[in-house]
Amino acid sequence: MKKVIATEKAPAAIGPYSQAIVSNGFVFLAGQIPLDPATGQIIEGGIAAQTERVLENVKAVLEAAGSSLANVVKTTVFLKDMSEFAKMNEVYAIYFSENAPARSTVEAARLPRNVLVEIDCIAGVD
């Protein structure tokens, strides 16, 4: 059994996918990019600003699914440029300050809409 999650507090899906799926006590989030859900525009600024917007989008989808950042067990971070890792990590550490989830970080040749960062995750549901 699976439940589709959709919230207006995060960017709408821009393809044939769901923002998230809840199944068997877990929520599986699609990759979030730094789109402002109110305007549909990419957040201007560097990697820090974009990472903050991505994590706010992740947080909004998690909350719509009945979960939270505290329940995240795994993230995958996709960076346009791995040399931006330290700046991304500073912002990431604010959102995951205690009991940080497992994480993979990879450099991707190109991300949707040419953004600097995309993050997906898996979390438990309360």
Image (cartoon, rainbow, N blue to C red):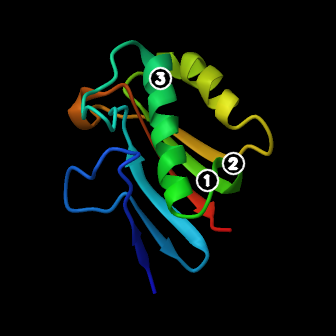
Residue 106 appears in the picture as rendered:
no
Measured Cα–Cα span from mark 2 to mark 3: 20 Å
Label 2: which secondary element: loop
The residue under label 2 is 101
Going from N to C along the chain, the mark reached first, 1 or 2, is: 1
Residue at 32% over, 33% down:
35
Q: Which mark is residue 43?
A: none
Front position among marks 2 and 3? 2
Q: Residues within 10 Å of mark 3 (few under 14, many from 20)?
A: some
Measured Cα–Cα span from mark 1 to mark 2: 5 Å
Whether residues under marks 3 and 1 lie with C-beta atoms below 8 angstroms apart, the answer is no
Residue at 61% over, 76% down:
25
Amino acid type indicated by mark 2: Pro
Q: Is residue 126 above or below residue 122?
A: below
Going from N to C along the chain, the mark reached first, 2 or 3, is: 3
The residue under label 3 is 82
Q: Position of residue 16 (x, y in %)?
A: 20, 62
Quadrant placement of the C terminus: bottom right
Label 3: which secondary element: helix
The residue under label 1 is 74
Residue 19 appears in the picture as rendered:
yes
Could you say which quadrant of the image residue 111 lies in?
top left
Residue at 45% over, 35% down:
54
Front position among marks 3 and 1? 1
**Quick check: 37 left or right of 57?**
left
Q: Position of residue 53 (x, y in %)?
A: 45, 30
Q: Residue furthest right?
A: 98
Q: Nearer the viewer, residue 77 or 25?
A: 25
